[in-house]
Structure formats: structure tokens, C-alpha cells
Amino acid sequence: MRTFLFLCFAVPISIVDIKTMHIPDWLTVSGCIMLLLYYLGFHRTELPAAAAGAVIIFTVFYLVRKLTSNGLGFGDVKYSFLCGLYGAFPVIVFGCIISAVLGLCCYGLVALFNGTERIRRMRIPFAPFMSAGTLIAFFII
């Protein structure tokens, strides 16, 4: 059920991010509320790990945003909290690594076919990679 709840928000967030390069706050907040209610209602013992995962990954993404001169959108930073709630700690750490690898592979392929000069100006939506990385890590670990 947790995966179903996550997918109910991850899929629309990924689609909207691809189309508009924007992640609506209402989707992220709604997803967080639904997952918190899920933990409170069905799996209270997993809530500390989920909260830790959300806070840790949010902090990592926030620091990446600050250290890379806004190279990562703030919508991605906020969405990382939802991914952290779903994946929980320590799964979300691996989810973050998988997301980064997937994103870098895509970025590399785009650069290969479009040239490095053009790619520097190009923005790539990261939410689909975050969703995929989180799901892959959740099912592997």
C-alpha cells in the first residue's frame, strides 16, 4: 500500500516536472500527508526511520542546491522529503545514489548527442530520476 501511495504522487510529479520543469507544492505536501497518515495508521514503528530518511535526504538535497548555485530546483529539494518518507532510512540513501547515477547517465547521453556547449544551457527534470531511484532502492534493499 505504501508503494501505491507513493506512485499516486510520484507519477504525476514526474510527468509535470518533465512537461513544465516545475513540481507543484500541493502534490508534494499531499503525498507527505498521505504517507504520514499511512505510517500513523498502519506502521507506527516504521515512522522514525521514515522521518529520519526524509530529514536526511532533504538536508542533503538542500545542501546540494546551495553549494551548486541552484543547480537543483527547490521543487526537487521538497520532493526529496516525500521520497525520503517513502524509502525511509537507510534505503533512501541508496535511492539518492541511484537517482544521481540515472540522472548523470541521461545527462551524458544528451551531451553526447547535442554537444557539451548546448547541454550547459539545458535544464533536465530530476523528479523522474528521483522517483525511479527511490523505487529501485526500495525493491532491491
Image (cartoon, grey):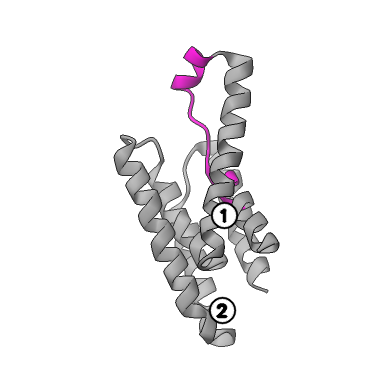
Figure check: 136 above or below 108: below
100 vs 79, nearest the viewer: 100
Q: Quadrant of residue 56?
A: bottom left
Residue 33 lies, in percent from the top left, at 48, 71
Q: Residue 134: horizontal and vertical position, in percent?
A: 59, 56
Q: Nearer the viewer, residue 53 or 70?
A: 53
Structural crowding at the residue carrying mark 1, measured as other residues with C-alpha within 10 Å and reported as few (<14), some (14–19) or many (≥20):
many
Q: In this view, does 110 lie above or below 70?
A: above
Q: In this view, does 111 lie above or below 88?
A: above
Q: What stretch is highlighted in magenta?
A: 116-131
Kind of element beneath mark 2: helix
**In this figure, which residue is indicated by the disc labeled 1?**
95
Q: Which amino acid does label 2 sit on?
A: Tyr
Q: Residue at x 61, y 32 (%)?
A: 106
Q: Which of marks 2 and 1 is nearer the N terminus?
A: 2
Which disc number belongs to residue 38? 2
Q: Distance between the residues labelled 2 and 1?
A: 21 Å
